[in-house]
Image (cartoon, helix red, strand yellow):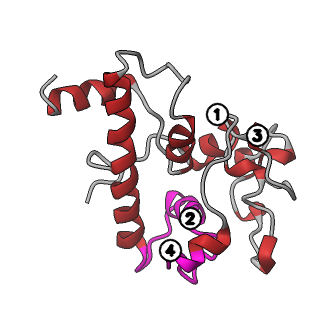
Amino acid sequence: MIFHPNLSPKEIIRMGSFGGIYFNSSNNIKIDFREFPSDWFKGVPENFYLSDKYNKNVNFFKIKSGQDQHEWENKGWIHPQDPRGWFQWYCRYYLGRRTEDDQRQIKRWSNFCGKRGRWRNYIYRKIFDKNTTVDDHSFSRGVRQSLLHWGYSVNQADYDIWKIQNGY
């Protein structure tokens, strides 16, 4: 299975994601941002990753996006080795860790924003139907923010490939 996010964990954090609360040890689930390279956080305001309260204005697209920890757990998306979910897994995978959960997480990513991913194809279809550009952020900001959380940034090269694959 192909796994090629086009954003690194560092880029996701720096762009503005998860309302700034991802590395807050909420719900008694401990996560320490210091586990990861310090340069991921250097020069980044602490409220971009360690806030006590969700702030949509931290997010790149200035919109609340995603589900909370409780919903992730109820849907069975949490593996014990990464109790904070996909992004924690991705950070560790990016740094070289490999585990028995990799294929499941890669499949989740692929279904979300891989070449046949539901939300990647949704946004490219919207761009096409609106006859606009990938840089037009006036619509589907929630989808775009969610894609960013999953390490994917909408881009012209992928949009061009999408058009060819769909006969446009």
Q: At numbered mark 2, what does the secondary structure look like: helix, strand or loop?
A: helix
Could you tell me how far apart the alpha carbons at marks 1 and 2 are, in whole angstroms?
25 Å
Which residue is disc 4 drawn over? 77
Which residue is disc 3 drawn over? 58
Please check the rendered image and state whether residue 10 is part of the magenta-colored stretch, yes or no: no
> Quadrant where the N terminus lies?
bottom left
Could you tell me how far apart the alpha carbons at marks 3 and 4 are, in whole angstroms?
25 Å
Q: Earlier in the sequence, mark 1 or mark 2?
A: 1
- Residue located at (82% from left, 37% from top): 43
Q: Earlier in the sequence, mark 3 or mark 4?
A: 3
Q: At numbered mark 3, what does the secondary structure look like: helix, strand or loop?
A: helix
> Quadrant where the C terminus lies?
top left
- Residue located at (46% from left, 42% from top): 152
Q: Earlier in the sequence, mark 3 or mark 2?
A: 3
Residue 130, quarter of the rendered image: top left
Q: Are marks 1 and 3 in contact (CB under 8 Å)?
A: no
Q: Is residue 83 left or right of residue 102?
A: right
Which is in the foreground here, disc 1 or disc 2?
1
Could you tell me how far apart the alpha carbons at marks 4 and 1 are, in whole angstroms?
25 Å
Which residue is disc 1 drawn over? 61
The 10 Å Cα crowd at callout 1, few under 14, some 14 to 19, many 20 or more, is many
Secondary structure mostly seen in magenta is loop
